[in-house]
Amino acid sequence: MRFLTKRRTPYDEYLFFLAQLKDLIRRNKDESDEGEELRAKMDELWFKIPEDKRREINKDVRLPNIRINE
Amino acid sequence: MPSLNGQATDFSTVCNYAAGQIIPNVSPLPPPTMWAQNSRFLGVTSREVLPPDPLPGSEIRPGNLGQGGGGMSVLPVIDVALLPNSRIPKRNGGTGSNVDCWFFLERRVVEVATDLRLHFDIGDAALRISHGAIEPAKPMKPWIFRNSLLTTSPDWVCLNH
């Protein structure tokens, strides 16, 4: 018998950790060491995710408009 | 992470004193030790600039493709695809800490610093798609690089956002 396994992509892993982080946020526990450890793991994955997926994850983000001396 | 008079503070505290786009007298927090514990400080973690198991007395060096090295991550423009969602504060729609602030540094500050250089490792600044790092300009002891980064502290501008 042969088994096929699907390797988890960085995007899958990021979403997995993101769900955990959102759960901490819901419980007001994300500013803890646990939350920071989770964010550090997610940092390493971010640039391995394709750009279109990164934009999808950040679709609700509102960034500052920086135009200082530029 | 913001600091006021050298002490760690948070965005909600410092934004109470700001009426405009910029929050005055607020700097990025320097790490309390040689190495930053994470990417929220004005500094680098040892993992960002040293190979695993470095020899005692190792110097850190500018980033070279496939050879490690590197420095403090910066972005020349804010592009949503470049920022990890977990580092964008919750108040801005991300899942990052609401304690943290946005800091802006004029490029010339790094360009005139003799021990630092600005190096883009992804994309091209002119195309607005880059990621870069403030790195040691030449191989140097970690404490020298740390001090060089700290000299930029007064030049970072804290954004009220």
Image: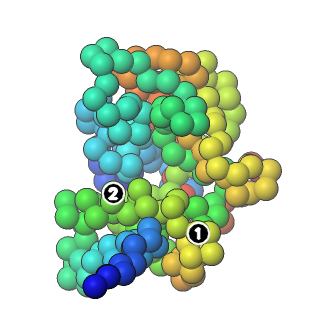
Task: Give residue B141's mark.
Answer: none
Reply above or below: B87 against A5: above
In-image side of B88 versus A20 (left or right)? right
Q: Where does label 2 land, which residue?
A: A40
Q: Residue at x 39, y 78 (%)?
A: A6
Residue B59 falls in image quadrant: top left
Residue B74 position, x and y percent, is 56, 47
- Secondary structure at numbered mark 1: loop
Mark 1: amino acid: Pro
For this rendering, which residue is in front, B115 or B99? Answer: B115
Disc 1 to disc 2, how far (Cα)?
A: 19 Å
Q: Where does label 1 land, which residue?
A: A50
- Secondary structure at numbered mark 2: helix
Whether residue A70 is visible, yes or no, is: yes
Residue B56 position, x and y percent, is 27, 16
Q: Residue at x 51, y 61 (%)?
A: A48
Reply above or below: B122 against B140: below
Residue B142 position, x and y percent, is 38, 22
Residue B117 falls in image quadrant: top right
Residue B6 position, x and y percent, is 33, 39
- Comes first in the chain, label 1 or label 2: 2
In-image side of A14 versus B161 (left or right)? left
The numbered mark 1 sits on a residue in which chain? A
Q: Residue at x 28, y 64 (%)?
A: A38
Mark 2: amino acid: Ala
In-image side of A51 versus A9 (left or right)? right
For this rendering, which residue is in front, B18 or B56? Answer: B56
Whether residue B161 is visible, yes or no, is: no
